[in-house]
Image (spheres, rainbow, N blue to C red):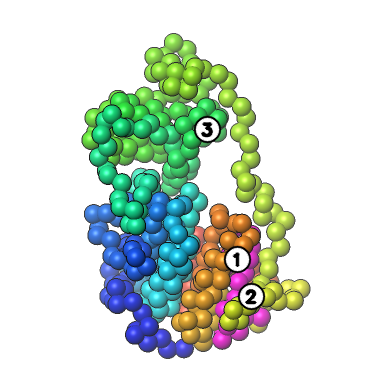
Amino acid sequence: MVISMREVDPVFKGAGQKDGLEIWRIEKLQAVSVPRKSHGKFFTGDCYIILKTSALKNGSFCQEIHYWLGKDTSQDEAGIAVIKTVELDAALGGRAVQYREVQGNETEKFLSYFKPCIIPEEGGAASGFRQAVVNEREYVARLFVCKGKHTVQVKEVPFARASLNHDDILILDTKSKIFQFNGLNSSIQERAKALEVVQYLKDANHEGKCDVAVVDDGKLMADADAGEFWGLFGGFAPLPKKTFSELDGKDNDFPSKLLCVNEDQTFPLDCEDLTRELLDSTKCYFLDCGSELYVWMGRETVLEDRKQAGLAAEELLREGNRPRSHIIRLMEGFETVIFRSKFSKWPKKVETVVSVESRGKVAG
């Protein structure tokens, strides 16, 4: 199905023609380009569209699209982000895999684009940006948890003893000092990555001028820094064992379900076995795998059908109270290796370039 560029937002004209990142923010229900100097700055009340373009050795480009939803974003803005993401993919020829990113539950692929990490700020386009420079008397201490050995996910948590645990690394950013608390069970690689985050906070929030202290879990001794750290939490006390996260083991018994999207209706297909023959090029489908929801779009579908499928996927997660689930949208002929592996039968002959989801590269 040929897509007319008249159906695509002009802001995407010329996108994806050079190696690197391009970012747009949803402002007043429109996509607005974000200048390069602001790449990596995210606000909790906003939605963003991120295009990653990689130059290949043969001179062509491989593109992947992410849309990021801040925790305080509105449902209308999230819907516009979905629609504009589909339009951007159409402008690129309908070949890009599209990923839904939710604040605090981003994919490693997305986080790898921003070094050393992203730390969203409160506020957004609708309410006006939070001032980057905060009056010293108003400086509020913030506690962050760091996860990851290669790419780091940084999430703000309540400034309370209950946020400390033996498995994670936590960073406490105060007015005059930044503390890195190394959980007893954290690895050397995780601690090294967390130090990069500490330096990032020092440069971003303190103009590079503040003290830094490392506090090791279980080694109180007579360390002045450790004493100061625990004093901020009301004094030293043993930490409880960490509880399992809400997603631990959640998908182990989740059976994959294939659903057909037909206009305003979504209905499950009655099939005992998932095969490629179930997918019709004139329709869109959902493959629901629990923590991941795939949206497959047939190459004969019109742009409006693809937009509606994207919106229906968002609605499915809202109705199921699954805010942490990922949505991955892909076009027929450009399925990822992981998506194809969900089917017991898939033709081995591939006539188009297929994105390798785990690496962000391409394979014939």
- Measured in 3D between alpha carbons, the distance from the residue under mark 1 to the one under mark 3, in whole angstroms, is 31 Å
Q: Residue furthest right?
A: 272
Magenta-colored span: 278-295
Q: Which sits earlier in the primary sequence, circle 3 or circle 2?
A: 3
* Residue 167 in the image, given as x and y percentages of width and height: 55, 33
Residue that numbered label 1 is attached to = 316
Residue that numbered label 3 is attached to = 163
Q: Report whether residue 109 is seen.
A: no
Are the residues at dot 1 and dot 2 in contact (C-beta closer than 8 Å)?
yes
Q: Amino acid at mark 1?
A: Leu
Q: Between residue 170 and residue 358, name the one nearer to us.
A: 170
Q: Amino acid at mark 2?
A: Thr
Quarter holding residue 212: top left
Q: Which sits earlier in the primary sequence, circle 1 or circle 2?
A: 2
- Measured in 3D between alpha carbons, the distance from the residue under mark 1 to the one under mark 2, in whole angstroms, is 9 Å
How many marks are shown on the rendered structure? 3
In terms of secondary structure, where does tag 2 sit? strand
User: Left or right: where does residue 318 sit relative to residue 15?
Assistant: right
Are the residues at dot 1 and dot 3 in contact (C-beta closer than 8 Å)?
no
Q: Report whether residue 73 is seen.
A: yes
Asked if residue 283 is positioned above or below residue 124 in the image, the reply reads below
Q: Which sits earlier in the primary sequence, circle 1 or circle 3?
A: 3
